[in-house]
């Protein structure tokens, strides 16, 4: 937490209630600008973003539902972020985290803290930083998160 504060990262929502309830409010967009639009992008897809899964990749939801990623093509083609593709990845991540909550979340107190992305050169100078205010972002341009590398002068 001290490193988080020293970096000036967002603490998220901190009403005097359980961190779980603060997180749920952030999932609904409270003090988490951009979260709802990013959730929506997960369901409708993004023709300007890259496809996540190879068509031949086998996905597993809840250890009960198995399918090839080519199923996403039915909803609009391939070669881009297809509808439900990102939402499926997030669901798989959520199941993993909830299944191993005690490993991933040692202290609920800091549950709503947002992270940051930092690129540091060989002389330890920060040449790029992005400080997240939303639950689901880690870059200024979520369609092309590595854009900052190509746009460096």
Image: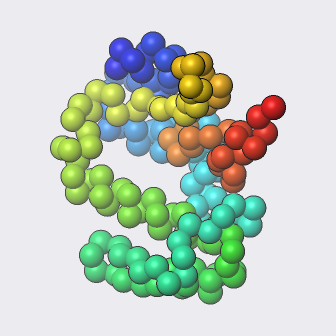
Residue 131 sits in quarter: top right
Q: Residue at x 64, y 59 (%)?
A: 41
Residue drawn at x 54%, y 20% is 124
Q: Position of residue 36 (x, y in %)?
A: 59, 48
Residue 114: % across, % down: 47, 32
Indicate the quadrant containing the C terminus: top left, top right, bottom left or bottom right. Answer: top right
Left or right for 99, reference 7: left
* 97 or 68, nearer to the observer: 68
The quadrant where residue 43 appears: bottom right
Looking at the picture, does residue 6 appear above or below residue 40? above
The one of 45 and 27 positioned closer to us in this rendering: 45
Q: Tell me what residue is drawn at x 36 percent, y 14 percent.
A: 2
Q: Residue at x 51, y 80 (%)?
A: 69
Colouring method of the image: rainbow
Which residue is outermost to the front? 122
Residue 83 point in image, percent of width and height: 62, 71
Q: Is residue 38 above or below residue 49?
A: above
Say if 118 sits above or below 124 in the image: below
Quarter holding the N terminus is top left
Residue extending farthest left: 102
Q: At which x and y percent is residue 14?
A: 41, 24
Residue 101, compared with residue 80, is above or below; it is above
| Residue 13 seen in the current view | no
């Amino acid at each position: 937490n001290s490193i988080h504060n020293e970096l000036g990262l967002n603490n998220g929502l901190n009403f005097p209630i359980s961190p779980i309830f603060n997180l749920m409010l952030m999932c609904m967009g409270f003090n988490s600008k951009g979260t709802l639009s990013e959730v929506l992008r997960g369901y409708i897809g993004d023709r300007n973003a890259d496809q996540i899964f190879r068509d031949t990749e086998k996905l597993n939801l809840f250890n009960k539902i198995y399918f090839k990623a080519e199923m996403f093509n039915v909803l609009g083609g391939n070669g881009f972020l297809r509808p439900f593709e990102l939402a499926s990845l997030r669901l798989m991540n959520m199941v993993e985290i909830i299944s191993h909550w005690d490993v991933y979340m040692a202290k609920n107190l800091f549950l709503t803290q947002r992270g940051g992305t930092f690129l540091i050169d060989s002389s330890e100078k920060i040449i790029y930083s992005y400080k997240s205010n939303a639950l689901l972002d880690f870059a200024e341009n979520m369609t092309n998160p590595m854009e900052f590398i190509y746009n460096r002068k």
